[in-house]
């Protein structure tokens, strides 16, 4: 009787049920779930703009930080965000999203903190240290750091003041106070 | 210990609710695990039947609009109560309640109560599936009781008594072999397992008589099923497995043979497909009838 043979084979062989650990290895060049490095992120929102399934979003409601948000359940793994990220803050190391019924494990939120402008105190998103070294290779001087600690308008003011001073000489203190 | 305390202990601890629930859940797990392994699956962990029960107990009960509320709630309670009382009657090792003349008859009655509850549950919920199931259960009951009652009555005739303790102590004879065969023939149908899973035929009439049951009442029906397994196993042990004398060996023998019995029923269930109700009925009246007549004849002759 073949049914007895089938039952015996089932009983003696390993169960056909697979656990999450039995997952097959991913092929070479597999993109998988993206990874985001908040220390490289400038909050430019390029990733959000190119994300067709809207898996990436930015939360800007907080006045002191910006939050990068990603939901793997909505991601199509197209890799466009990786391609468009100007600072390589987003990479895809070829990892699969975790096999789970808990959706919270498929959601990632990274907070990138604002810093007050050194002059006027307005919140600004500072350029990450690694980017600074990329922009000014071997020349990250004190003046560069001071400039990076300013907000856009303070930096503009400082630049025009520098240019004017170069042509007219340093303006006297009283004149500055009246303008 | 006075009489009342003994009965209370037997009813609540051993061999009643607590012990039998643990054993019944163990048997159900053994059956599920073995079925899974025979089908090449992994099978549930040992605590799964308990988790199922607890989960059901925690759910809100929805009573069907046309159902009689009182009956809807009473039936599972009666089924559990009858099975628990039946457990007290059977003189398994460690049962503090003494056997009394005529307890075989009481036990046979108590064994039928959960079946009747199932039949009534099928009708009371007003579901067409439940009604089909109830009808099937009623027909099947008239079938499997032929070898079942035949076996018990033949053993009673053999022992010359209607007291279970005397049936337990009866000497071994040809009648025991015939009666055991007849008894075993009836067990798959009593447990509603394949090939006689006709009343609770899944994928066919959904879940049978319990289709409209949910929450705590369904948990009680599941519990009564677990207790029923223990009760039938206990009855089998008392009728056909003689006592060795040493309590520890007896307990071990009891556990080993009961699990062997559960495994055998499960293996048969995995091996076979469901019969139609007509074929099952014919099977019990022909083969069950032959086994019953043979055991009765052996009891009368010896």
Image (tube, coloured by chain):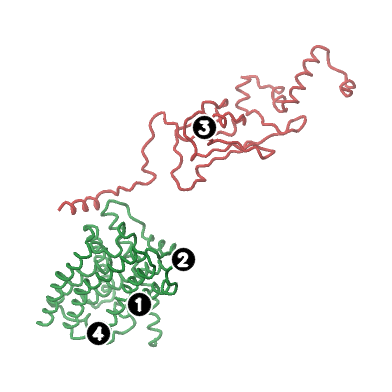
Chain colours: A red, B green
Where residue B109 sits: x, y (%)?
A: 29, 80
10 Å crowding of disc 2: few (<14), some (14-19), many (20+): some
Q: Quadrant of the C terminus of chain A?
A: top right
Where residue B170 sits: x, y (%)?
A: 18, 81
Disc 2 with disc 4 on a shared chain: yes
Q: CA distance from mark 2 to mark 4?
A: 41 Å
Q: Which residue is mark 3?
A: A52
Left or right: where B279 falls relative to A139: left
Front label number (1 vs 4): 1
Where residue B110 sits: x, y (%)?
A: 31, 78
Q: Is residue B264 visible?
A: no
Q: Earlier in the sequence, mark 1 or mark 4?
A: 1
Whether the residues at callouts 1 and 4 have beta carbons within 8 Å, the answer is no
Q: Is residue A117 visible?
A: yes
Q: Tell me, for residue B61, which label it has, or none.
A: 2
Q: Residue at x 24, y 69 (%)?
A: B187
Q: Which residue is mark 4?
A: B163
Above or below residue A1? Residue B1 is below
Q: Residue at x 54, y 34 (%)?
A: A36
Front label number (1 vs 3): 3
Q: Residue furthest top?
A: A167
What is the secondary structure assignment of the residue under circle 2?
Answer: loop
Q: CA distance from mark 3 to mark 2?
A: 45 Å
Disc 2 with disc 1 on a shared chain: yes
Front label number (2 vs 4): 2
Front label number (4 vs 3): 3
Q: Which residue is mark 1?
A: B82
């Amino acid at each position: 009787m073949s049914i007895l043979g089938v039952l015996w084979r089932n009983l003696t062989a390993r169960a056909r049920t697979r656990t999450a650990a039995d997952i097959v290895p991913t092929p070479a060049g597999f993109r998988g779930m993206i990874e985001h490095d908040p220390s490289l992120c400038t909050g430019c929102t390029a990733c959000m703009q190119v994300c067709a399934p809207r898996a990436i979003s930015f939360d800007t409601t907080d006045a002191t930080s910006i939050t990068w948000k990603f939901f793997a359940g909505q991601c199509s793994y197209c890799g466009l965000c990786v391609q468009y990220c100007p600072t390589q803050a987003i990479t895809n190391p070829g990892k699969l999203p975790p096999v789970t019924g808990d959706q919270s494990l498929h959601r990632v939120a990274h907070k990138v903190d604002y810093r007050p402008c050194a002059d006027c105190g307005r919140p600004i998103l500072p350029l990450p240290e690694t980017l600074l070294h990329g922009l000014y290779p071997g020349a990250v001087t004190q003046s560069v750091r001071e400039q990076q600690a300013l907000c856009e308008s303070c930096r503009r003011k400082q630049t025009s003041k520098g240019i004017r001073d170069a042509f007219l000489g340093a303006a006297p203190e009283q004149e500055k106070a009246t303008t | 210990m006075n009489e009342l305390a003994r009965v209370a202990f037997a009813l609540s601890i051993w061999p009643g609710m607590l012990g039998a629930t643990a054993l019944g859940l163990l048997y159900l797990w053994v059956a599920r695990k073995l079925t899974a392994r025979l089908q090449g699956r992994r099978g549930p962990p040992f605590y799964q039947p308990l988790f199922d029960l607890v989960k059901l107990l925690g759910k809100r009960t929805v009573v069907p609009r046309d159902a009689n509320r009182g009956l809807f709630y009473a039936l599972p309670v009666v089924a559990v109560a009858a099975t628990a009382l039946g457990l007290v009657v059977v003189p398994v090792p460690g049962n503090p309640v003494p056997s009394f003349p005529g307890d075989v008859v009481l036990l046979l009655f108590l064994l039928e109560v959960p079946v009747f509850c199932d039949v009534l549950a099928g009708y009371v919920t007003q579901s067409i599936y439940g009604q089909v199931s109830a009808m099937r259960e009623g027909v099947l009951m008239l079938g499997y009781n032929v070898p079942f009652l035949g076996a018990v009555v033949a053993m009673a005739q053999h022992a010359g008594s209607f007291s279970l303790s005397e049936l337990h102590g009866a000497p071994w004879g040809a009648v025991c072999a015939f009666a055991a065969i007849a008894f075993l023939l009836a067990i798959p149908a009593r447990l509603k397992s394949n090939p006689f899973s006709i009343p609770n035929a899944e994928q066919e009439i959904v879940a049978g008589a319990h289709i409209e049951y949910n929450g705590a009442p369904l948990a009680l029906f599941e519990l009564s099923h677990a207790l029923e397994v223990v009760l039938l196993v206990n009855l089998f042990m008392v009728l056909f497995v003689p006592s060795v004398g040493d309590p520890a060996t007896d307990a071990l023998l009891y556990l080993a043979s009961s699990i062997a019995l559960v495994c055998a029923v499960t293996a048969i269930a995995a091996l076979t497909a469901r019969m139609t109700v007509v074929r099952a009925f014919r099977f019990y009246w022909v083969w069950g009838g032959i086994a019953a007549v043979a055991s009765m004849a052996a009891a009368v002759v010896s």
